[in-house]
Every structure is written in C-alpha cells, then in structure tokens.
Image (tube, rainbow, N blue to C red):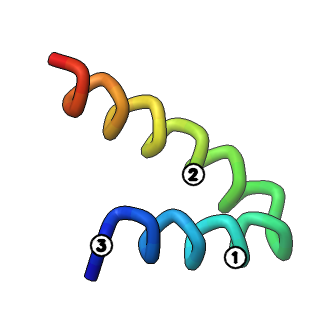
Amino acid sequence: MQWVDVVRVLLRYGHEAPATRARLDELVDVAVARLLS
C-alpha cells in the first residue's frame, strides 16, 4: 500500500467524523515531518 492510498482512506473517514479528521491532521503532520527529516 502506498502513502497516497493511506491518505485517501484517512481523508474518506475524516469527512465522516470530525474527531477522526483532527487525529488525521496530527498523523499527517508527523508523516510529513519524518519524510522531510
């Protein structure tokens, strides 16, 4: 599974639940920080 696939799935669930979306934002921040470091 590619990162793009993971993001698509998380975004789909994020639209359904605000709490999930907030958590998704945190996960994306961590993922981006790791990719850029």
**Amino acid under disc 1:** Tyr
Which residue lies under the disc numbered 2?
24
**Image-based side of 29 in relation to 16, left or right:** left
Q: Quadrant of the C terminus?
A: top left
Q: Position of residue 20 (x, y in %)?
A: 66, 61
Horizontal relation, residue 11 to residue 3: left or right: right
The quadrant where residue 36 appears: top left
Q: Residues within 10 Å of mark 3 (few under 14, many from 20)?
A: few
Residue 28 is situated, as x and y percent measured from the top left of the image, at 47, 41
**Quarter-wise, where is residue 33 in the image?**
top left
- Three-letter residue code for mark 2: Leu
Answer yes or no: do the residues labelled 2 and 1 have beta carbons within 8 Å? yes
Q: Which residue is mark 3?
A: 2
Q: Which residue is mark 1?
A: 13
- On-image quarter of the N terminus: bottom left
- For badge 3, the amino acid type reads Gln
Q: Where does the image place residue 25, in percent across and percent down from the top left?
A: 60, 40
Q: In the picture provided, is 36 more to the left or to the right than 5?
A: left
- The earlier-in-sequence mark between 3 and 1 is 3
- 14 sits left or right of 16 in the view: left
